[in-house]
Image (tube, rainbow, N blue to C red):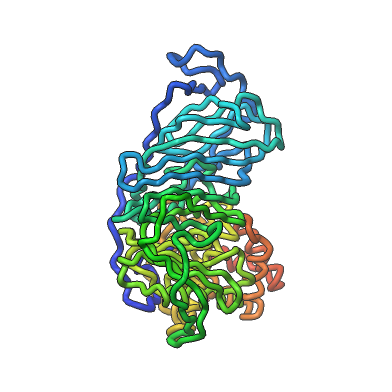
Amino acid sequence: MTTAGKSRIALTKPPRAAVNGALVLALAGSLTACQIPIRDDGGPTPGASSEPGLGAVPGAPDSAGDTYVPGDGNTGYDVQHYKLNLDIRPGQATELTGVAEITAKATKPLTRFNLDLSGLTVAEVKVDGAVARHERQASELIVAPAKPLAKDAAFTVAVRYSGTPRPVAKPPLGTYGWVRTTDGVFVACQPSGAHTWYPSNDHPSDKATFEFQVTVPPGLTAIANGEPVGELPGGSGGQSPTVPGPGGTGAPSGGGVIGVARRAAAPITWRVKEPMAPYLATVNVGRFDVRDGTSPGGVKVITAVDPTVDNTDINAFHAKNMQITDEFVKLFGPYPFSSSGGLVDNANVGFALETQTRPVYGSFGADEGIVAHELAHMWFGDSVSVTQWKDIWLNEGFATYAEWIWSERATGVTPQQAFDELYAQEGNGALWDIPTGSPGRTNMFSSDAVYNRGAMTLHALRKKVGDAKFFEILKKWTQTYRHSNATTQQFIAIVEEVSGQQLDDFFQAWLYSRGRPAL
């Protein structure tokens, strides 16, 4: 993720950030007649239905145990796949009506389990086709299947729900989650906004494949992660953009444009073939011009821009997505997903987010440095994801350093110059007094401690081990933990294996100690 204007080496004048945030809105949905409140001991809540209790709960489910996002995530099962059938009606009293079909595997015997869900009304829950009891407690949907689930059992949960998702408003990110635009919806959910619009195991440690079946009003379309089933929604055909080098032009890439008038209310299906963390899921509804092509390096690229955003030329944006993707393949290893690209919407937000395969950008546009940052996340954060949020520097420090690398190619400003400018700020407490490797919940998106000092850590590592070893380390990291989760300690192990050096003191100084490390 980047906030508007966050990049220290801006390739264009950064835009002004959007509104400041306030509080997370997490409104619990009302109980329906078929719901039987469930006590911790398995019996019905006093004053509720007189039906028999649910019995003892072996290994009662709890959260993922991540103190940076308390309450998020659940234990007891591993999600394999989400199929989200969504009817989205922006501006209506009920904006979202959905059925979420979740395929999972029990990791222990379960007589009940939890899903994360807030602010929406649940009409029915079924487990393996049988109606299941369910209860709402704050942002938890507690489900008791008709029959207990054995350890290692595969099972399917179907949740029928509706409502109008509430956006999250929280500094320093401003408003995120389900954000209304003038013609639709913009969805960007880091770190834990997924459960505001679909029931999920909302923590990056439980990744799954996805399918989105989306119905929208005539005149609108839906752009999601992955690739569409069949033709791009709304038709194809049109111009062929070019792929420029930094400051130059290149050869035609192929592609098409989706005219805003050619929309129908038929369902639009997008599929994500590789595992994805829940917060990276996105469905953007509105009017979009779209380009679809293949980069010179062979990566499918789908790019979309709301035509009312006049600061982003879709052909140039599409070509830049191709160029940066191909360049990063050379540096970081094979592209980890089935497509790349990006989407710029007329959303009044002050950030961009690395939604998997298709980063999303607010109405401030797609500055070249921010595009490089978000595309680098496809390797660092999306394919290799954090196990817990305290290691967020593995996402943001790496993406910021990739941004520095791209800046050298585009402007001539080197990573060493970026490093030196920051290192000279000896009295910058935000940079030196917060441990990068464990910044704390309130500082997890600190532009100084996490983004910039994280990038500085990587540059200092590059100087210590040399260019050849450094880029070998990055490629081994993205290969070893491709489509999975990892920790800082696992990164350090790879560094020491590849470099042949013992680097405990180095990482202690740069990631976990307060004060400016000595050079």
User: Along the line of sight, which residue is nearer the eye, 74 or 308?
Assistant: 308
Q: How many marks?
A: 0
User: How far across and how far down the image is residue 224, in percent?
Assistant: 48, 56
Position of the N terminus, as image quadrant, is bottom left
Between residues 157 and 436, which one lies in front from this camera angle? 157
Q: From the viewer's perspective, is residue 272 above or below residue 167?
A: below
Q: Is residue 142 above or below residue 197?
A: above
Could you say which quadrant of the image residue 15 lies in?
Answer: bottom left
Please identify the quarter of the rendering in which residue 273 is found.
bottom right
Residue 477 lies in quadrant? bottom right
Instruction: In the rendered view, tell whether residue 166 sits above or below residue 387.
Output: above
The percent coordinates of residue 21 (x first, y second) are 31, 52
Give how far across and how far down residue 50 sits, in percent: 49, 12
Residue 431 visible in this rendered orientation of the protein: no
Q: Residue at x 45, y 87 (%)?
A: 248
Nearest to the observer: residue 206 or residue 237 = 237
What residue lies at 66% left-to-right and 40% top-to-bottom?
Answer: 105
User: Residue shown at 49%/79% (left/top)?
Assistant: 415
